[in-house]
Amino acid sequence: MKESIIIKKLKHKVEELKAKRVIDSAIINVLKEELQYYVLNFIYNNPKYSHFTMYGGSLLRIVYELPRMSEGIDFQTDTEFELNELKNDLVAYFKSQYLTDIEVSINERPKLDTKLFKLSFNMLTNFNLAVNWTKLKLRIDINYFEESSRFDTEIIPKVHDDLAFSIKTYPLSTLMASKILAVLERTSRGIAGKTADCKPRDIYDLIWYLKQKTYPDLEYLQIKGKEYKNLIELFNDLKFRVANLDDKLFEDDLGQFFFDHTDYDFWFSNWRQTFLNLINNYKIFEIDKLEAVDFRIDFSTENRYLRYIFSSKSAKDRIIFIVSISDYWFGFSDIKIDSGHRVSKIEDKIESQEKLSELDFEYIGLFYKKIEDFIKRNNGVIYLNDFKTRLIRATADNLNPKEQIFLDKKLLEKIQFEELL
């Protein structure tokens, strides 16, 4: 019987990892991660399922290079779909495309909004690994969230070997909010036959978000039943919850997701203090009023940079919002935003060495409204005094999601400020 293309590729991957002396348990997680790409290739190249919005640890791993490995895939959707149809389509896809037989079981969990799919690949005997089982299992969680369409999404192209697809996901602000929700609500977990009071990988991911200085989407939390007026209230709850966790089972859950266990040991040795330092570094600023708007053009790229400078009620601090926007938005008629965004009351505060066009004033007004809305929704309380957006692009070619965001005109007009960060 002809050997599966997937098994051939995974054999090569195992040989590479063994040559680097990677332990077998870590190799198994690498194999699961490789299979994730095949599942994502199926999902996002199939019009029946491409509406799924990916989130969770695997999303961070695949798109943002999260240092820890991840073993499952998480999706959200507000669209009903037939569970058995997805099951049959997955089986048919792996059989027809890769000569690979898989088993798929479904746990519908009627009382929960999340449906669990378990994919079993009967292939572990091909890799000469020290394990007592033959099947490699991959978990897919699909959460039905009726309000998900209220939140902006991003489309991020991904190429992996000969696979190419575009992931639909939330901006980091919404992703962080979903992780915070998990940290606050997952209070009893079974780990290695014992009960833990959290899911350790959630704590690891939360600390990663804090290192990025991501600003969580409070609206997402509110719709999910967590009402916070501002970050002060939210971070106070997080500090109480996380700093008081019992971490005795962290290694049993989290240690397996590192190539080198010393990386886990280093993280674990000071995780609590790291968390507290990072969350306390979100300083509190109470915004007063707009002082100036600085409009500049980078002559090497012709990208525009808009700096909105606000005073604070402490009188000694200034809060600066920097918007970076590609020159494409100013040069192509089918991309340019429509009129109606100008804010005349701020135009006497604009400082620029350039002669501003009508279109320049439209963009300045558009982003001012986003910032003003952001401040209002947080009751004028901000945890950073320096906000900088990713470069807002109108094309997706060679997109770097860490530093750039791709939007069309409608999304640019709709998206909230924190989702640009």
Image (spheres, helix red, strand yellow):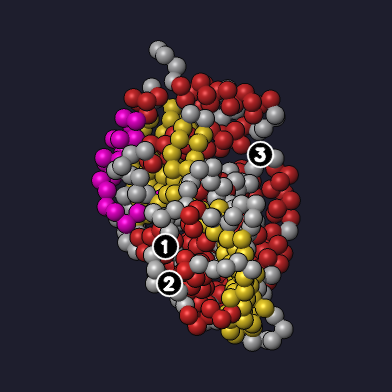
Q: Which mark is nearer the camera, 3 or 1?
A: 1
Q: Say the numbered circle drawn on residue 14.
A: none
Q: Residues within 10 Å of mark 3 (few under 14, many from 20)?
A: many
Q: In the image, residue 288 lies at what x, y percent?
A: 59, 85
Q: In the image, residue 101 lies at what x, y percent?
A: 37, 26
Q: Residue at x 44, y 43 (%)?
A: 166
Tell me if residue 375 comes above or below residue 2 in the rendering. below
Q: Look at the image and tell me in which quarter the N terminus lies.
A: top left
Q: Which mark is nearer the camera, 3 or 2?
A: 2
Q: Is residue 16 shown left or right of residue 33? A: right
Which badge, 3 or 1, is on the more N-terminal residue? 3
Disc 2 residue type?
Answer: His
Verify CB contact (< 8 Å) between mark 2 and mark 1.
Answer: yes
Disc 1 residue type?
Answer: Ile
Look at the image and tell me whether residue 362 can be seen: yes
Q: Say the numbered circle drawn on residue 337.
A: 1
Q: Residues within 10 Å of mark 1 (few under 14, many from 20)?
A: some
> For numbered disc 3, what is the local secondary structure?
loop
> For numbered disc 1, what is the local secondary structure?
loop
Verify CB contact (< 8 Å) between mark 3 and mark 2.
Answer: no
Disc 3 residue type?
Answer: Phe
Q: In the image, residue 6 lies at what x, y percent?
A: 47, 25
Which residues are the magenta region?
75-93
Q: Residue at x 37, y 25 (%)?
A: 97
